[in-house]
Amino acid sequence: MGIHRGHRARPLEWIAERGIFLVALSTILMIFLIFVFVGREAMPILFGQENSALIKPVIPPEEMDRLKPEELQAYLGLSDKAFRQMERETLRELMIVKQEAQEEIPEQLRNDPDAHLNTTEWSAMLLPRQWSGYDEPVYIWQPIGSIHKYNIVPLIIGSLKVTLVGLLVAVPLAVGAAIYVSQLARPRVREVVKPVIEMLSGIPSVVIGFFALLVMASVLQSVFGYQTRLNAFVAGIALSFAVIPLVFSIAEDALTSVPRSYTQAALALGASRWQTAWQIVLPTALPGVFAAVVLGFGRAIGETMIVLMVCSASVVSWSIFDSARTITTTIAAEMAEAVAGGHHYRILFMLGAILFAVTFISNLIGDVVIHRLKHRLEGKR
Amino acid sequence: MNPIPPTGMIIPTEPGRHFRAGKFDFWSFFFSGLTGLATLLILAILAVLLGNIIINGWPNLSWHFVSTIPRKDFFDPATTGVLPMIIGTTIRVFVMTIFVLPIGVITAIYLTEYAPTDSMLTRIIRAAVNNLAGVPSIVFGLFGLGFFINFIGRNLDEFLQNPGPVWGQPAVLWASLTLAVMTLPVVIVATEESLKAIPLGLREASLALGATKLETICKVVLPQALPGIMTGGILAVSRAAGEVAPILFTGVAYYMASLPSKLSDQFMDLGYHVFVLSTQSPDIERTRPILYATVLVLLLLTFALNFVAILIRARVRKKLRALG
């Protein structure tokens, strides 16, 4: 909008206006910073520079002088600054400590082939492996004990499972309500119902999680009669409460933006209101509804607290990892225990980076589709 | 082919009033009913959720409960309270507002008043705003940990030559800044909406009287847009007050004996307390009353604010519609 007329800005005002422009770039900067700083912590994992193997080759302290400084720094795992500040004797001490620590590993573990495996490699993170003590190759996420198992497949499946249940419940309800509110309801009903449904989005996700945990879980169990009280199904339904308002308001917006002349033409030809809504309005606004589903997917896969409270409420304290655990809950539950800068910490950041990439792409798709639709329906703006 | 007729030709009609189908069609009736049922079901979910919390929470809410600082074992219904949580949540939201309001409002001013409509840069800024709104809250938490604490905080400690970590650890300030980044799109969208509702004539009149553009914005446009900016602020506050995931690693504490006094302190939080009470309680039946009371306090805080914002927003929208 903005008008490009009027007096020329005074020098001070010119500076202020430049300032306004720079501040306006802050959102782009923030997206960029999120990319950089979540990615920065995950970098060693993404490029396979981290080695989480329990048993590493030991260099005896006597051979210290044969190593190049870079090799020594990498071997001791020190940062540039720390390495430069340390004296020769301190470095030697560190090497001795490292050697002793390796020697203290019990013999039993020493012979275990798993102890020599770098579990942060992509093959270990994505492919099943027959760990010692297991009868067959398995996908397992178990960042505790002496050998950390970081297979991310169960987490991805868990996320997709919960998200899918959530969307299967949320999308029909939200799109149905959007059709009703935008096309079929009387104006007075519409004025009341729309803000009330939007109010649902104002409920904090911990409150939805709490409700699902304390009330819904038991009710759903008595209705459907399954074994475990807390599972992906309950989490998915609770998740749908958070997704419904988002899908509803985007779909409703898209349906409302279909020009009145379309509906009028259909009604004038003798179509009923439902036929008009179903055969004329919905096909026209279909990209918008699609965008609503895509954005709903992004919201659902990124939801943390609801799933954390419902699905892995017990897991948090007992450290039993089941398949219904999602990416988000894993990050939330384990970050506090992960050593800063360690491989567990970096893997969690990598999961965050994956999550960010997925939601970034789904947001972008949704945004472009909505923009195109509006462009087509409203002409050039 | 242009499907849109010239504006003059559109006859203003209320949907559903002037056009009627000729004869009764069963399937139309059936499917209309189905969509109506979907709407009703959503409303029912909302009603059950709120009703359950209010009915179970209200009897357990007392002045003693909201004004007591609990001891370490806060699962005991008789002695527990939520005062430090209310204060913690209030502080983090307040600090957040100080950061997010100016940046959000200025960005919205740029987008409505200055940005060239069709430029690539404007498109990118808008896409960034929309995208920021869709970033999962847990990713904001990771960002706060990676950027504010590990990068800014640690370098600040080094720069100030603090003996131990002061800023390079979870703190109120970092939690607030993380939330500010998260709620930025909320403020921008609400402010933009209210700026667009101000008639162009007002700006033109001001310019015609000899004011410069910036003067027009500061003295004519912004005062008019105040209710909208307030809505944005309130919506951001209510969104942030209920969020737990972004503060998990950036500042929240499970228990603190004293109230936070510096920006580098950690804090207790209402939303996190709800999480702790419902998942870590040794005896859920015994803690149920205080859990419900805590949820009700949280809901009153966030929902009441949200409700006010929706009322103001409805007014702004009406004004917008009246202007056409």
Image: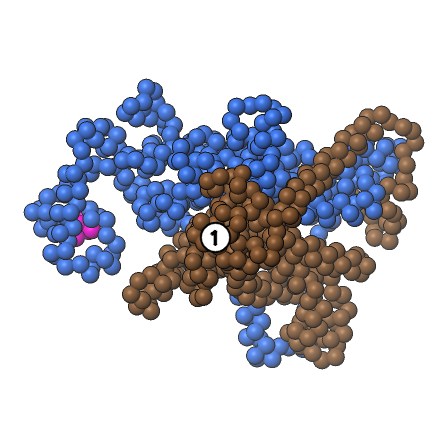
Chain colours: A blue, B brown
- Residue A253 screen position, x and y as percent: 71, 45
Secondary structure of the residue carrying tag 1 is: helix
Number of numbered discs visible in the structure rendering: 1
- Inspect this view and state whether residue B163 appears: yes
Residue at left offset 81%, top offset 59%:
B322
- Residue A227 screen position, x and y as percent: 52, 23
The picture quadrant where one finds residue A349 is top left
Quadrant of the image for the N terminus of chain A?
bottom right
In the displayed structure image, the side of residue B293 where residue A83 appears, left or right: left
Residue A170 is a magenta residue: no
Q: Which is nearer the eye, B296 or A18?
A: B296
The picture quadrant where one finds residue A222 is top right
Q: Is residue A312 above or below residue B160?
A: above
Residue at left offset 80%, top offset 27%:
B30
Outermost right residue: B22
Q: Which is nearer the eye, A204 or B74?
A: B74
Quadrant of the image for the C terminus of chain A?
bottom right
- The residue at which mark 1 appears reads as B247
Majority secondary structure of the magenta segment?
Answer: helix
Which region of the structure is painted magenta?
A68-73
Q: Is residue A245 above or below residue B70?
A: above
Residue at left offset 87%, top offset 47%:
B13
Q: Which is nearer the eye, A246 or B122?
A: A246
Residue A69 is a magenta residue: yes
- Residue B107 screen position, x and y as percent: 59, 63
Q: Chain of mark 1?
A: B
In the displayed structure image, the side of residue B67 where residue B39 appears, left or right: right
